[in-house]
Image: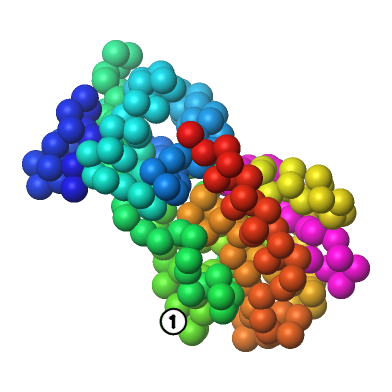
Amino acid sequence: RIVYVNGSYVPEEEAKVSVFDRAFLMADGIYEVTTVVGGKLIDFAGHMARLGRSLAALKMTPPADTEALLAIHRELVVRNGLDEGLIYLQVSRGSADRDFSFPPEGTPPTLVLFTQKVAVLERESVRSGIKVASVPDLRWGLRDIKTVQLLYPSMAKMEAKSKGADDAWMVESDGTVTEGSSNNAYIITKAGTLVTRALSHAILHGITRLAVLRLARETGLTVEERSFTLDEAKDAREAFITSASAFVTPVVSIDGQRIGDGTPGETTKRMREIYIAESLATAI
Ligand code: PLP
């Protein structure tokens, strides 16, 4: 695999960053994951807009402009013959002697991109739906910044797996669901209303979430952006998650409790189809 590191395309064995890189020492880095289908990028503009927000929130120097980043994405698709998969992009504050203060102005950011060949259209998790287990949300308070500080979500996923589930739904101390370990969480109530948590510092502002909510409203679904409790979710007619790589993926049980009849819901399946159709039609 050919990866991109700070201006060079190199075989992955030769790709190197400093041990003093701030992402390595302090998780002082941010990332984006863009999905590729048919060699084209899904919602590239959305991912770059969020990258800009993460950079601004952390006062990090942009590593390159959007046009240059698009060129790197496309070059990696070509060099790796990537038809279907993901492109991971990471920016860190660069390398500097270990210090809690940010390094001096002008320290060049580290930019790394690599591809991952994975199936996104056809997945077993879509046919059968996934099981989720609740885990307390013990992450830091600025979850809307897409930092590489992923230890707690990783632990949450392992905890969920140890309970026989596929992923975690993280829950605040007031009993409301925030999101999955790497995806946004939704329910469809018995009245047919689509409910997902409102945007705040408590969740990552999913690029897929934005598109799915717009499409849901366009198809005439009633959408409520509000918190819901774990109990309300367990009593829902349907549940699903969204992310750049999962698109819309059904949730069929929560803490061992079946959702609806325990199979992927009809509205969920329809939203997946609509989302994929639009994404493929607008991919660049
Ligand atoms: N929430 C969290 C915590 C995530 O890590 C992610 C994606 O990685 C998402 C939600 C979904 O965001 P997107 O739809 O932009 O992939």
Nearer to me, 193 or 55: 193
Nearer to me, 143 or 224: 224
Most distant residue in the top direction: 106
Q: At 43% across and 40% down in the image, what residue appears?
A: 40
Q: Amino acid at mark 1?
A: Ser
Return the x and y of residue 130 as percentages of the image width and height: 56, 75
Q: Quadrant of residue 271?
A: bottom right
Q: Indicate left or right for 146 with 277 as reference.
A: left
Most distant residue in the right direction: 191
Asked if residue 197 is positioned above or below residue 252 in the image, the reply reads above
Residue 204: within the magenta?
yes
Mark 1, secondary structure of its residue = helix
Q: At 48% across and 74% down in the image, what residue appears?
A: 124
Q: At 31% across and 29% down in the image, what residue appears?
A: 72
| Residue that numbered label 1 is attached to | 162
Most distant residue in the left direction: 14
Return the x and y of residue 244 as percentages of the image width and height: 51, 50
**Ligand 1 neighbours mark 1 (CB distance < 8 Å):** no
Using the rendered image of the protein, determine whether residue 270 is visible from the camera's viewpoint: yes
Q: Which residues are magenta?
A: 187-209
Nearer to me, 124 or 256: 124
Chief secondary structure of the magenta portion: loop
Asked if residue 178 is positioned above or below residue 157 in the image, the reply reads above
Asked if residue 58 is positioned above or below residue 151 in the image, the reply reads above
Q: Indicate left or right for 31 with 183 as reference.
A: left
Q: How many marks?
A: 1
Using the rendered image of the protein, determine whether residue 96 is visible from the camera's viewpoint: no
Return the x and y of residue 96 as percentages of the image width and height: 22, 27
